[in-house]
Each structure stands twice: as structure tokens, then as C-alpha cells.
Image: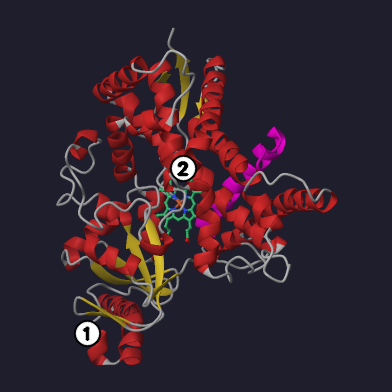
Amino acid sequence: MEMISVCVIIGVVLGVCLLVRRLNELWYLVKLGGRAYKSLPPGDLGWPVIGYSFSSYKTFIVQEDPISFIQSLHSRYGKGGMYKTHLYGNPTVIVTNPEICRRIYLDEANFKQHYPKSVKILEGSSGDFSNMDHKIAYKVMASPMNGYEVLSNYVDFIEEVIAKGLEEWSSMMREPIKLVDEIGILFFKVITKIFLGSQLDAKTMVELHTLYKELSFGMVMSTFPYDFPGFTFHQLLKARRKIENTIQGVVEEKIRRFENDKTSEVQCQVDKLVVAINENGAKLYSNNFIRDLILGIFFAGHSTPAIAACWALLHISQNPHVFQKAKEEQESIIRQRPSVQKGLTLNEIKQMKYLTKIINEVLRRNTITATNFRETKTDVNINGHFIPKGWTVQIWNIAVHMDPQIYSNPQEFNPSRWDNYTPKPGEFIPFGLGSRFCPGSELAKLEITILLHHFILNYKMEGVNLESNNNQMPSPRPENCLCKIIRLS
Ligand code: HEM
């Protein structure tokens, strides 16, 4: 009798679980209607509210293996490259097929950028930046970082910062350094110079760098975006306010300089924005716009290229044949240099064909921006699959780059796979595509190239532990990589 009761209880519990588990499906079935529901991409909406958020969290944070999440979708629902799911409170379609990723990136009529609230925090608090027409805002962001002439102007400065940085790290030989942080500080110097004209003092630079680290950590961990003491989101807002205050101080100082001295020289992008006026003589960009623009640019402008550069140093140090081939190329370029020439030129950088392959391979193998987010503006039909208006679409750049049908043996770090290889459209998307294509891509590649050039010719690395301490969020990065940089005699 007792046995029967236990079985009944277990049966009821399982039945209830099964029913609850199906509630999300039933909710969308009723909401969309049977036909529309059936033409959604294959997949599973999971539990009510939480959907598959915990699985996604587990694969990124606990297992540090986002590809296993995609592999399980492939094995359960086929390799169509579009899967419905439910993540972080939103019905979501995950896209892993290169052609569909490309199509979504380029389709501004049907898709808009959409990030979780914790990431949107980067837009700043005033709304002046996010409400600005995107084409204008993009031009303001991209113009100081693109084009042959513009970039030529930065080569000397970047080289100086990097050469000094490497020298300092090697002089602290007994103390291992946290590589990704140290490179981040160097690249921070570059981006502040480009946008502010001068560098911030060392203390402010380190403070900002630490606050930005808090920000990126909080953006990931803040699963509940509510501003209550004790919640990560609360800490996130506090960090952002501190960053805003510091940047605001810098912008106001510049405004005062131009007010006090009308002939003051315009030296950098922020100067240009501060003095810009419209046809009626009114200020073109509000102070809040400028502050929020800088807040976002500083975030994007130092951490992502630093992570890529760190991976590059680790890979070449762990692959002696790659290091040797790269060294031969660098030495050959230096041998051809006129004796009067002091430093690198952009023309020399353009000759670094093998180094370019190394950087491409890093951007593929360690896709820094693993996913990008969009939202459907209207009901959309792609390859016979229906995506309802208002759904989130996650473009999985990392899945494209780790697809064995596109890149054989994708786990292998192999710069030579780029010999005579041009990826098909959508198959290599480290910087996205379309109107939101990363405006800092050229600058990032320039910084990484100059760092590798100096490292390969003059230094080596010791004490690397590539296998452990990687972190997948917010970007796949060798978070805790400690190493020594040693100058070759
Ligand atoms: C290896 C380094 C970098 C990687 C992998 C990277 C990746 C990306 C990607 C994938 C996007 C597209 C986002 C989307 O479509 O939603 C993007 C946008 C952006 N990136 Fe980068 N980025 C890097 C370096 C930089 C640098 C150095 C800067 C500038 C200082 C920068 C500034 C930006 C900005 C401002 C956007 C937003 C563009 C917009 O929304 O219109 N990035 N980046």
C-alpha cells in the first residue's frame, strides 16, 4: 500500500514538473497561434521565465565551453543554424549559420540592436547618446580611428607606449604580471590620447581601468537588473556613476579651456565635439552626449583589443614554429629599413602578411565578441522559419568561427589556414557586419600588430598557464594568466 502511495506521489510530482516545463511552449502556442508556432525555428523554450538561462550560464561560466551549448543544439535539432530558446526572460532565436548571421547583421529594416539592461548601461545615463541618429553617432566614433592617414599619425605614439610597457614588464622580471590587465592599461593610454588629446594621469587611468573591470564583471553577473543595495546591478550603477563623474570632469575642463581662450588649438576628437556648432551657432553636441560617447568608447577601446593581444601572445609563445616564422618575417622587414628610419611605419605594417594571419587566427580561435544581440522590429521570415516581432536574436559569431565544416579542426591554432584563403561572406565576423561594424577594428589590429612586432623581436614569455583560469564572460579571455616577460639579450 505504502509502495503504491509513493509511486502515486512520484507520478504526480513528475506530471506537475512536466506540465510546468511545457508552460512556456503552451503560452507561446496560444499567443502566436498554431500555424505560426509550428513555423518557429526548431528548439525548446524550456522552463517558464528562466527558460534555458541556467544552461547558458552553466556553459559560459561554469564549464567555460559555450561551444558545447551549440553542439547540443546541433545534435538535438539538426544543423539548420536557427534555434528557438528562452534566455534571460526573453523568447530568443540563436543563429549559428554564417549566411543567416550575415543576413541579420545587414537587415536594418527588420532588426535593431538590442542588449540586456545590464549591457545597455554602457550607453550612459542621459540618453543623449543613444537617442542620437546612429549614422551621426557612428561617424563621430569612427572618424578618429579609420583611414590610412589617421592611423599613420598614431603609429609613433602606439609604438612608444608599447615599447615602454614591455620594457617595464621585463624590468619587473621577478614579479609575474597579469597580462590582460597590463595590456589593457597600455591600450587605455592609446584610446585616451586619441579621444582626449593627452593622457590621463597614471592614478586616474588605473582607477578608471579598475572601474571598467567592475563594470564588465557586473554586466555579466547581474542576472537581476534591479537597483537595490546588495544587487550586482546596484554596484554596476555605482561604478558607472564614478566613471561618468571622472569623464565629466575632463570634458568640463576642456569646455572651460575653449571658453577662456577662443584661439585654443583643437587637438583631439573631444575638442572637435566641444567646439562644434550648428548653422545657428548653437552647440552641436551636448556635454552629456560627449561624456556618454567617451564612456562607451573607453570601454570598447581597451578591453577587447587587450584580450585579443593577450591571446595572440599566448598562442605564439606556445607554438614555437609560429613564433619562429613570425620572427623571420619581422627581421626581414627590419633588414630592409633605411638606416635613418627610427620606428615602424604603416607601410612596413602592411608588409606583415604572416602576422596578419596570426591576428586573423586569434580573432577566429578566440572570438572575443562571442555573440551579438538584435531584436526583431517586425515579424520576420527566414528560410521558412518565423521569428515574431519583439523576439531577441542572438548572433553566435563564435559558433561560425568554430564550425568544423568551415574551419577544419577549429580548436587548433593554425595561422597557415589563412594561406590563400578568403572566407565566404559571413564566415569571418569578429567585428560584426553592416552599419554597426566595429569602428575600432583597424585601430585594434594596429595595436596588436605593434605589440607583437616588439615582443617577437625582443622578448619571450615564461610562466604561462593557458589551460586554466580562462573566463568566457563577458568575452573569452585568459583572465588570470600570470606570466613573466623576459627581454632577450
Ligand atoms: C579585437 C578587438 C575588438 C573586437 C573583437 C570588437 C568587436 C566588435 C563587434 C563584434 C562589434 C559589433 C557589435 C554589434 O553588431 O552589435 C563592435 C562594435 C563596436 N566597437 Fe568594437 N571590437 C574591438 C575593438 C574595438 C576598439 C579598439 C574600439 C574603439 C575604440 C571599438 C569600439 C566599438 C564601438 C564604439 C562599437 C559600437 C558600434 C555601433 O554600435 O555602431 N571596438 N565591436
* Mark 2 vs mark 1: in front: 2
Label 1, ligand 1: CB separation under 8 Å: no
Instruction: Pinpoint residue 422: horizontal percent, then vertical percent.
Output: 20, 47
Q: Is residue 414 visible?
A: no
In the picture of the structure, the residue carrying the numbered disc 1 is 38
- Figure quadrant of residue 355: top left
The majority secondary structure of the magenta stretch comes to helix
* In the displayed structure image, the side of residue 411 where residue 463 appears, left or right: right
- 245 relative to 113 in the view: left or right: right
> Nearer the N terminus, badge 2 or badge 1?
1
- Looking at the image, residue 358 lies above or below residue 216: above
Residue 18 screen position, x and y as percent = 30, 78
Residue at the (26%, 85%) spot, across then down: 37
Q: Amino acid at mark 1?
A: Lys
Instruction: Please say whether residue 277 is visible from this viewpoint.
Output: yes
Which of 327/137 is in front? 137
Tell me the SS state at disc 2.
helix
Q: Secondary structure at mark 1?
A: helix
Image location (x, y in percent) of residue 432: 36, 57
Q: Residue at x 26, y 50 (%)?
A: 401
**What's the mark number on residue 259?**
none
How crowded pointer 1 is (Cα within 10 Å; few <14, some 14-19, many 20+) is rated as few
Taking the magenta stretch, the answer to whether it contains residue 203 is: yes
Quadrant of residue 353 within the rendered picture? top left
Q: Quarter of the image containing the C terminus?
A: top left
Which stretch is magenta? 197-222
Residue at image position (68%, 50%) is 271
Residue 458 versus residue 437 in the image, above or below = above
What residue does disc 2 label?
443
